[in-house]
Image (cartoon, helix red, strand yellow):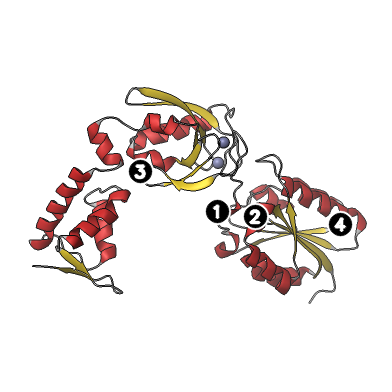
Amino acid sequence: MSDKTVAVFIDADNISPASAVDIFKHVRKFGEPIIRRAYGTVKCFSNAEGWQRAQREYGIVARPLVCNVPGKNIADIALVIDAMEVLYKSSCDGVCIVSNDSDFTALASKIREGGKEVYGFGGEKAPMSFRSACTKFVVLPRRSIETQSNEKRPSKCPRCGEELIASRTKSNRNCRTCTKCGGMSAKITVLKNIFSEEGLNELLRRASEYEKNGCVCPDCGSAMSIVKVSSTGSSVEIDVCAKCKTVWYDKDEFEALLPNDGVLQAAVSAGKAYRRELVAALAADLKSKRLKVPHIGVLKNVLKKIYHTPQPDIDPVLSTLMSQKIIKIESGTGKIVVIG
Ligand SMILES: [Zn+2]
Ligand SMILES: [Zn+2]
């Protein structure tokens, strides 16, 4: 154990409380951690249990900060201010900065110029400049830096500031909606049933090249780009985040993109006829043993990969197969028995 002392600053916006064990294992090699603080938005401390444990077991003091403007790194700024204070006012020999994707290169350089050591901690994707500005950089195991991506994100409506509510699109995919203005955010993959893969790649390419003059991404806080897209006659301007591949739709924009065309409609959310055909085909294939599926998981995969069944249709198809007594699924094991 070293007779030196260090201050530990954790950027809690992108570091999980579970990382404490890994962090302090290393920190103690560099010195006795006399200051231990974690900075983040109120939202990122919503994993209250995890942070309370980190506080109990490692004495980490959580510094939740109220974010008034979405997308502003108030936690990073607070961390920098406190680290500078340590540099000038405390007798610590070193400063540990724990962050996964924020760039604290300038801070690290400043602290070293001030005569103290800087120990960086972070994931594989920590910027090279930051790593080399540190006296030493410790790569944390992946489990340490995986925070619950949906919980930590600022999820305010970029138009009216209302909290976004988790919901489902018509094609039964995850999205978040604003009950006040009717806007919606969803990952770009939700458009998979509407546009081809090339179409989606083109959309992302434009989003990354266009000026970032759209709204603030409700998922990652970056500025989004406005991209015009058309589908079956209607065209809308959507806000696309090239960084985290999130799309923001103002009220009715998403619906405007949904195809009216019967064939495409079936692909978005297959109707009863589609399911009936699919069940008949499956029944024939299962009974003739052309299709062998030992397990419910395998059948789901087969439906998805081979029969190209849209996700929202998979469960209804399975229950029809059972209600029509074509298959039986053993409860508990998930084993499939073909009847007859
Ligand atoms: Zn809104
Ligand atoms: Zn984003």
On residue 149, which mark appears? 1
Residue mark closest to the camera, 1 vs 4: 1
Q: Position of residue 165 (x, y in %)?
A: 53, 46
Quadrant containing the N terminus is: bottom right
Q: Amino acid at mark 2?
A: Cys
Q: Going from the N terminus, do you reach mark 1 or mark 4 first?
A: 4
Q: Residue furthest front?
A: 180
Q: Which residue is disc 4 drawn over?
A: 86
Mark 3 neighbour density, 10 Å: few (under 14) some (14–19) many (20 or more): some
Q: Amino acid at mark 4?
A: Val
Q: Which residue is disc 2 drawn over?
A: 44
Residue depicted at 65% across the width and 53% down the height: 43
Rendered-image quarter of ligand 1: top right
CB under 8 Å between discs 1 and 4:
no
Q: Is mark 1 within 8 Å of ligand 2?
A: no
**Alpha carbon of mark 2 to alpha carbon of mark 1: how far?**
10 Å
Residue 339 shown left or right of residue 70 in the figure? left
Q: Going from the N terminus, do you reach mark 3 or mark 4 first?
A: 4
Q: Nearer the viewer, residue 38 or 25?
A: 38
Residue mark closest to the camera, 3 vs 1: 3
Residue depicted at 26% across the width and 52% down the height: 305
Q: Which residue is disc 3 drawn over?
A: 171
Residue mark closest to the camera, 3 vs 4: 3
